[in-house]
Image (cartoon, helix red, strand yellow):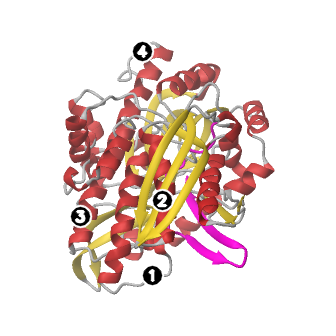
Amino acid sequence: MAFRFLPDVAIADIAFEVTAATLEDLFAEAGMALLEASANPNDVKLKIKKEIKLSNTHIDRLLFDWLAELIYLKDAESLLFSKFEVKIKRDGEYQLDATAWGSTIDYKDMELRNDVKAVTMHMFEVKQTDKGWMATVVIDI
Amino acid sequence: MINCGMRLVTTNLTLKEVKPRIRELVDTLFQTVPAGVGGKGFVKVNNSQFNDVMQEGTQWCIKQGYGWEEDIERTEEDGRIKQAEHEKVSEQARKRGISQLGTLGSGNHYLEIQYADEIHDEAIAKAMGITEKGQIVVMVHCGSRGFGHQIATDYLRVFDDAMKKYGIAVNDRELACAPFNSKEGQDYYKAMACAANMAFANRQVILHRIREGFEKVFKTSAEKLDMHMVYDVAHNMAKVEEHSIDGERKKLVVHRKGSTRSFGPNHPELIDKYKKTGQPVILGGSMETGSYLLVGTEGAMKETFGSTAHGSGRTMSRTRAKGEFRGDKLQREMEARGIYVKSMSMSGLAEEAGAAYKDIHEVVKSIEKAGISKPVTSLLPLGNVKG
């Protein structure tokens, strides 16, 4: 699994593409891309554990909800996460059951980057490929 | 960001007086106006007070002592969109926004100490409080922060479903919409107005801190420093306005996204101070190359529903700029050129390099040629606080 930032897409914001063999890895890696945009991942130690449960009828909207939840936790609870374990099952609708590890934002000990404000629907896509899954995301800065 | 906008404040200080104190001034403002990732504001409010912020915007701030009475009428819509209903705002948005009042944010949001350079129209500049080349002004660019974004995210989900219900198709899902008079449309408008009012309040309390910062550094009152607000204008908001279409007056929803209101002289919504001149238009450039104060025109009323450009705009993506420039090197180079910049993030600073933006002078020439606003004075940066 991997993510890469797309240098010539949505120039006032930040775009990234994620590829992974499984849906679970796709979600975890998208979480890491979000972190990379916000702070130096090496500075976000695994001090706090948070359980996150979400559900949606569409898989793309579930990824949207997942990233929106991480952005919400950054502002409402001052949390950044650097490790994710994600489980997704389909029981009528998609259900996400995840554990995220990270720490409280620390202005002294963390290299902070962009204050990500939202995940957008611009070019937003989750699709199945020959090798697994792929997502394109533009986050608003 | 809902009601992202610009605010410009004058002083009676000169470049000669402020240049030797710029480090102290920027350091003071950097300390007192929080910026950056997850920044918490200096105005602490409870749920009930936050409801008042959402409903009353700037007017709440003045009641609490965060500003001067005259600031109200110098803000678009008197700093309050009346249709706001806090019941239309989700609990998540509330939790996200309640601690953000009095924060600058990051990205291209900033607080900049500038000085007047070329004065293009002396009479209008004077009416707006700028009387000479080298006069110090302060520009603020920020909005409703994560609060407004959470409202947008909440209603993006609502509209995604509403578009199917109303049979609306768009090329880009980010342009999600619903008929204005539908329940979904009205709910969003009332929630959006809450975010707009929070943004007006955010810029207002920041202005209060700026005045306090100048008082501390220059050891005199903001009143004696003539720290009057020129204007506060949004560049990302939808509003109901009356315009002429084929000679007939009609009520329209004007959505200015990356666009500033630019009402010309004698527009009924302008205050007496700007009735003759037209509305002040604040155009932000890059932190290296400067900004502009312009004025609205009759041409904008005829051609663009009273709208003009909002800034110079990027030519290079954030991701590419980060690869091309280094924040610490840029900071040193700018200081050598007389611009003292302080940022929460060095990579964020690199993304904002002047070369990543269009030439603002060319942008201004274009909008002047189009007749939708005309330059009053160009403004050059001296010190900058970035998120």
For marks 3 and 2, give the CA distance. 29 Å
Q: Earlier in the sequence, mark 4 or mark 3?
A: 3
Residues shaded magenta? A112-141
Q: Quadrant of residue B96?
A: top left
- Residue occupying image coordinates x 20% and y 52%: B87
The reply to the same-chain question for discs 1 and 3 is: yes
Would residue B7 appear left or right of A21 to someone viewing this image? left
Q: Chain of mark 3?
A: B
Q: Which of pointers 4 and 3 indicates the residue nearer the eye?
A: 3
- Is B218 rendered above or below residue B100? above
Q: Which residue is mark 3?
A: B187
State the CA–CA distance, disc 4 to disc 2.
58 Å
Q: Alpha-carbon distance for marks 4 and 3?
A: 46 Å
Q: Which chain is disc 4 placed on?
A: B
- Label 3 secondary element: helix
Q: Does residue B168 show up magenta in the picture? A: no
Foreground mark, 3 or 2, reads 2
Residue designated by label 2:
A96
x, y percentage for residue A43?
67, 34
Q: Amino acid at mark 2?
A: Leu
In terms of image quadrants, where is residue B177? bottom left
The residue labelled by disc 4 is B220
Name the residue: 78% across, 51% down.
B323
- Which one is nearer the viewer's eye here, B278 or A30? A30
The reply to whether label 4 and label 2 mark residues of one chain is no
Q: CA distance from mark 2 to mark 1?
A: 29 Å
